[in-house]
Amino acid sequence: MIVYELRDLIEELDKRGKVKKIDGADPHLEIGTITELICEGDDPATLLFDKIKGYPEGYRIVTNIVQDSVTGQKLSFGIPEDLSPLESVRWFKDKMAEYKPVPPVEVKTGPVMENVMTGNDIDIHKFPTPKWHEHDGGRYIGTGDAEINKDPDTGWLNVGTYRVMLQEDDNKVVSYYISEGKHGRIIRDKYWAKGEECPVVMVFGATPLLYEVACTTFPPGMPELDVMGYFRGKPVEVIKGPATGLPIPATAEIAIEGFASPPSVETRPEGPFGEWTGYFGSGTLMEPVLRIKGIYHRNNPILHGAAPLKPPIPYAFPIAFHSVSVLWSRLEQAGIPGIKGVYGYGPGDRGIIVIAIEQSYTGQVKEVATLAAAFLHGNLAAKYIIVVDSDIDPSNLKEVLWAWVSRCDPETQIDIRGEYLTSRLDPSLPPERRATQHWSSGRVFIDACRPFYRFKDFAKVNRASDELRKKVGDKWGSVIRA
């Protein structure tokens, strides 16, 4: 079962008793703090805010619809609900192994065009926009969003997720930050190198699937809108942006389009912002802006809020396939045999990468770790890469820690290497690197496997064999499961 539309997913989760409806909250810190407090509970719900202080009834904000909701995440991709976290990652990897692009189809109009603002009517302040965290530099309309831009050389349509801040003194402009190395930034820089403005579409009420593919690390050149069509089994309907010519998803809740000028032409203050690292990572800096040429929204629009909270509350999704399934595929495509599972932990589910392998030759562990480091870059990615044996479930952190402390000799099985790309959001960057914009960090490679040459004489694991467990389970099942 796949639930595509944001409204439909809210309705489906509501039927299952997983939605809390909250009226009258203040967008200044209350909505963000309510979300934080509820997400810290044992059974966090999706939150639907209405009658927001200072705004008309029907102008709503939804939070936690996929971030801390396994059900919401699975429904938006069509993942069978009975699969475990590692099985879900494998499902996504296998689904992408059969990927065939389903390009979007252009339509004349759609629900997103129920309300159109252009020229003097443009007012981005019309929408309830929270100040999510106490020390944020402003109100952020772009958290659970999706930005669309087009490579001027290849025509590749990229979709990414980047933070977007209102400017209180100007209702026709937003500032936005993109980390170093991100596809949207690379494309934007190409326009600027040509002396041109970069056309951009920003979607602030994205369908959950659009938001999730925007967060997923696909290879350069793979159009996320085509990926969406593949998962849906039919093309995504888009409307040609009147100002930019870029595709606007026809069923989006809120979308804007405009042009980003080079920093030499215009910048505005942006940040700080409470980031997925669990810190305010970048201070207030002068960042590029988007001059808005059109605002489009549905009747009774829903803003998707996905402001990061301090870990272990998930920044993106409770199941880490958005960060590791592509890595798993790329390791296999590189010819490394015996990859049995890949999982991620820490901020963004990518700071700690765990790879389970079935060893078949000496040096295999180092090959796997080195390739993983090459395939993942930026924003704290793969600061720690742990390779474990195939008897360890990489999505079970207790098993991973057990293998680490019992099979890893720190003197010979831990390597540290430097000069990997990170970003200014990395709170561990020393001041001298920040001052020179030297966005690099070290990585730790941890071999938590039994050494290949010691397989025969390594200590046996204290666990009943599968045969014995089945025999006893068949005889004593009524007692064991009571």
Image (tube, helix red, strand yellow):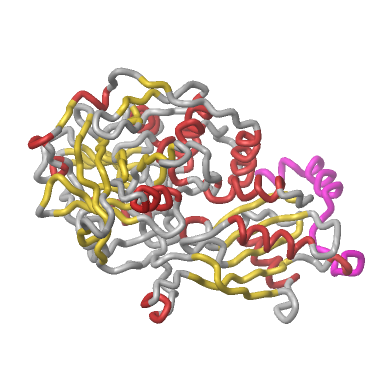
Closest to the observer, 49 or 56: 56
Using the image, determine if residue 461 lies above or below residue 42.
below
Quadrant in which the C terminus is drawn: top right
- The extreme top residue here reads 108
How many numbered callouts?
0
Q: Is residue 471 magenta?
A: yes
In the image, taking residue 353 as reference, residue 146 lies left or right, namely: left
Using the image, determine if residue 251 lies above or below residue 433.
above
Residue 27: x %, y % from top left: 18, 50
Q: Residue at x 43, y 68 (%)?
A: 426
Regarding residue 212, the answer to whether it shows in the image is no
- The extreme front residue here reads 194
- The extreme right residue here reads 456
Q: Quadrant of residue 240?
A: top left
Q: Residue at x 69, y 50 (%)?
A: 331
**Range drawn in magenta:** 455-482
Q: Is residue 27 magenta?
A: no
Residue 461: x %, y % from top left: 81, 63
Residue 9: x %, y % from top left: 38, 31
Regarding residue 399, the answer to whether it shows in the image is yes
Q: Residue at x 87, y 65 (%)?
A: 455
In the image, taking residue 142 as reference, residue 464 lies left or right, namely: right
In the image, taking residue 209 as reference, residue 101 lies left or right, namely: right
